[in-house]
Amino acid sequence: MNIEEISEEEYNLFIKNYPDSLFFQSVEWAKYKEEFGWEKLIIGLKEDGKLLAAAILLGKDAPLLKKKMYYSPRGIIIDYNNYELIKKFTKLLKPFLKKHNALFLKMNPYIKYCERDIDGKVISDNKNELINFLKKNGYKHYKMYIKAEDKKELEPRWLSVLDIDNKTMDEVFKNMHQTTRWMINKSQKNYISVHEATDKDIPLFKKMMQNTADRRNFEDRPLIYYQKMFEVLGKSNMIKILMADIDLKALHQSIINDINHLKERIEKVKDNPKKANQVNEFNSQISSIENKLPDILEKIKKYGEKPYIAAGLYLFYGDQVVYLYGCSYKEFMSFGAQYLMQYKVIEEAIDKKYKKFNFYGIDGDFRKESPNYGLFEFKRGFNANVVELIGEFDYPTNKFTYFIYTIMFKTYKFLKRLKRHK
């Protein structure tokens, strides 16, 4: 039994039937990361020529040390129920990493810690024992964060995932929360259209992402990050960016038409004393919808007749579609474009026989007063379950050097933050 480098073809055949594989574990993602200076290693654990486990390792120089750090996005492709196999793999992994001048390997397996429902409540008290097993075999486990602001890991531990396996769109739509269904229907009445972006639209997508980042206080990626992702992953049809616009002129005219229609109905019954209540109701409706007109006219003046108001970046791989990034303008959120985009992609995922639609990261704090509750509630409305993963691990090749590195890296990060906020 030994660990060796394997071909892309061998790796792709092995991962093909692996459950819950994500785009992070794809060869295409590794090629994309190479564009930003990451080294790519594709390795496999073999016994008598048979492949038992595999992984893509992304390597970079470790800050402050003449060593490399390697990262296996979403973990090794291995049977995590087979502890003996994991033990053998780990034993062989250290000399392989040392051969490549590695200080440590980082990984964050897509393995559930426990079962939860759509509200985040624990269904079963059975906690995954894999954490303790990995720790006993030399892996350093990061503290399992709850609130997003405490997250120090590369990828979120808390996810929101909708099961669409062998389901029709009608079934999925029926199981959505009533408010979500209403917002999807409302968005279509608001003259919102969803379009697939081209490479020329990426700067506009970046502009919306930056607006959302500024509003929600997170650091956005540079434009080249999205451009390269679209270029590299687009070759394998793994990526799709949807952009939603709203026809404000048509919406304005539609409201005027509704008002005129109500006025016509009033004219027909206004002289009938028995219809007095109905006339009052019609006048109340007119007053309500007339209030929308100034806001729409102001938006036309500021943004034009047909502005883009929301967008989403989706990745298709294995049995999951992942909603990786979403953005929108706050002024237009009430029109429901975000809901319509998810509906469209879920519908496509079902048509293409994917098993899961992964809304990706959420906060593990499910209290209504939580600052990130709105994002959780939006995703939960589609009837997506909370998925809690076991978290992130480092596997050091030298414990003492790794200890020194962690101290140096914390200091480096602190000084970098301090410089940024000066």
Image (cartoon, grey):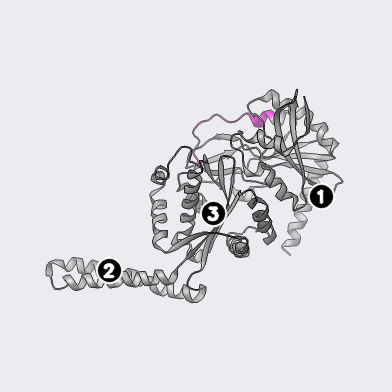
Name the spot of residue 40 as percent of width and height, x first. Answer: 76, 44
Q: Is residue 203 above or below residue 31?
A: below
N-term mark: 1 or 3: 1
Q: Marks 1/3: CA distance?
A: 33 Å
Q: Residue 289: which quarter of the image?
A: bottom left
Q: Quadrant of the C terminus?
A: bottom right
Q: Which residue is mark 2?
A: 284
Q: Residue at left 39%, top 56%?
A: 185
Mostly what secondary structure, the magenta segment? loop
Name the element at disc 3.
Answer: loop
Under tag 1, what secondary structure? Answer: loop
Q: Secondary structure at mark 2?
A: helix
Is 164 placed above or below 310 here?
A: above
- Image x and y of residue 416, in percent: 76, 57
- Residue 197 visible: yes
Point out residue 85 in the picture as x, y percentages from the top left corner: 70, 25
Q: Which residues are magenta?
A: 120-133
The mark found on residue 371 in the picture is 3
Most foreground residue, 353 or 219: 353
Which labelled disc corresponds to residue 63?
1
Give the number of the mark in front: 1 or 3.
1
Figure check: 83 above or below 142: above
Marks 2 and 1 sit apart, C-alpha to C-alpha, by: 66 Å
Residue type (three-letter) at the residue carrying disc 2: Ser
**Magenta-span inclusion, residue 129:** yes
Question: On the image, which quarter does residue 90 sit in?
Answer: top right
The residue that appears at 68% across and 42% down in the rendered structure is: 73
Residue in the image at 60% along x and 51% along y: 239
- Most foreground residue, 157 or 296: 296
Type of amino acid at the residue the image marks with label 3:
Pro
Query: In this rendering, would 343 be left or right of 44?
Result: left
